[in-house]
Amino acid sequence: MKSTTSSNPTTNKQLVKSAQQIQQKSTFISEADYYDYEAELAQEKSDYYHLQYGY
């Protein structure tokens, strides 16, 4: 599949802008997922200190 770019600078700017908007939307996570992730990090940190320092 070929991809072509336009020689028109305004069209290229629009394509870049739309790609950035898609990227921003795809990196959004829900609040519940955020807190689950934070809990996992806290557990990993706790496990690390427990193994490293024995407490």
Image (spheres, rainbow, N blue to C red):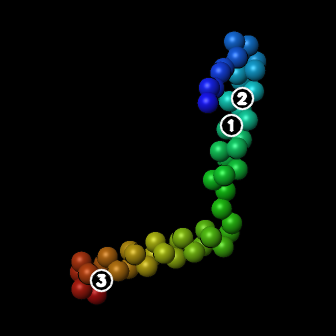
| Between marks 3 and 2 in the image, the one whose residue lies nearer the viewer | 2
| Marks 1 and 3 close (CB-CB < 8 Å) | no
**Local secondary structure at mark 3:** helix
Where residue 40 appears, as percent x and y from the top left, is: 48, 75
Circle on res. 15: 2
Q: Nearer the viewer, residue 32 or 23?
A: 23
Where is mark 1, residue-wise?
A: 19
Q: Residue at x 71, y 23 (%)?
A: 13
**Local secondary structure at mark 1:** helix
| Between marks 1 and 3 in the image, the one whose residue lies nearer the viewer | 1
Q: Residue at x 69, y 12 (%)?
A: 7
Kindly indicate the quadrant of the structure image that contains residue 43. Answer: bottom left
| Residue type, numbered disc 2 | Leu
In this rendering, the answer to whether 35 lies above or below 18 is below
Within 10 Å of disc 3 (Cα), the crowding (few <14, some 14-19, many 20+) is few
| Marks 2 and 1 close (CB-CB < 8 Å) | yes
The mark nearer the N terminus, 3 or 2, is 2
| Residue type, numbered disc 1 | Ala
In this rendering, the answer to whether 46 lies above or below 17 is below
In this rendering, the answer to whether 14 lies above or below 20 is above
Where is mark 3, residue-wise?
A: 50
Kindly indicate the quadrant of the structure image that contains residue 32. Answer: bottom right
Q: How far apart are labels 1 and 3 at the CA level?
A: 44 Å
| Marks 3 and 2 close (CB-CB < 8 Å) | no
Kindly indicate the quadrant of the structure image that contains residue 2. Answer: top right
